[in-house]
Amino acid sequence: MTRKTRSDCTVGTFEKKHGLPPGTIRNDDGRDTRSDKKIGTIRKERGQK
């Protein structure tokens, strides 16, 4: 079972850690998310726990 990513991890670090190309994680409007944005902030915006 995989663990949930920490909420204080940044988007840039997450993409590097998982081998994803830059710009993989996108905002709701389709633009790529800033690399210094935190995963916890994205979760709050989308209404998840």
Image (cartoon, rainbow, N blue to C red):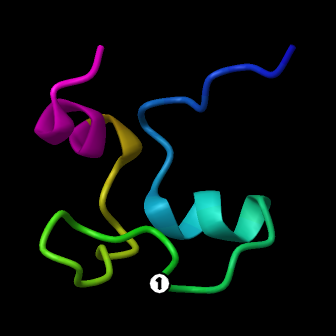
Residue 31 place in picture, x, y as percent: 23, 84
Residue 1 forms part of the magenta stretch: no
43 left or right, relative to 45: right
Figure check: 18 above or below 49: below
Callout 1: 10 Å neighbours few (<14), some, many (20+)?
some
Figure check: 7 above or below 32: above
Instruction: Please give the name of the residue rendered at 30% of the width and 14% of the height, measured from the top-left corner.
Output: 49
Residue 34, picture quadrant: bottom left
Residue 43 forms part of the magenta stretch: yes
Residue situated furthest right in the rendering: 1
Span colored in magenta: 41-49
Circle 1: residue type: Gly
Figure check: 15 above or below 9: below
Instruction: Please give the name of the residue rendered at 54% of the width and 29% of the height, measured from the top-left corner.
Output: 6
Figure check: 29 above or below 46: below
Q: Which is more toward the observer, 40 or 27?
A: 27
Residue 43 place in picture, x, y as percent: 28, 34
Instruction: Please give the name of the residue rendered at 44% of the width and 68% of the height, measured from the top-left corner.
Output: 25
44 left or right, relative to 39: left
22 left or right, relative to 17: left
Under circle 1, the secondary element is loop
For the N terminus, which image quadrant?
top right
Residue 41 place in picture, x, y as percent: 23, 41
Q: From the image, give the main secondary structure of the stretch colored magenta.
A: helix
The residue that mark 1 highlights is 23
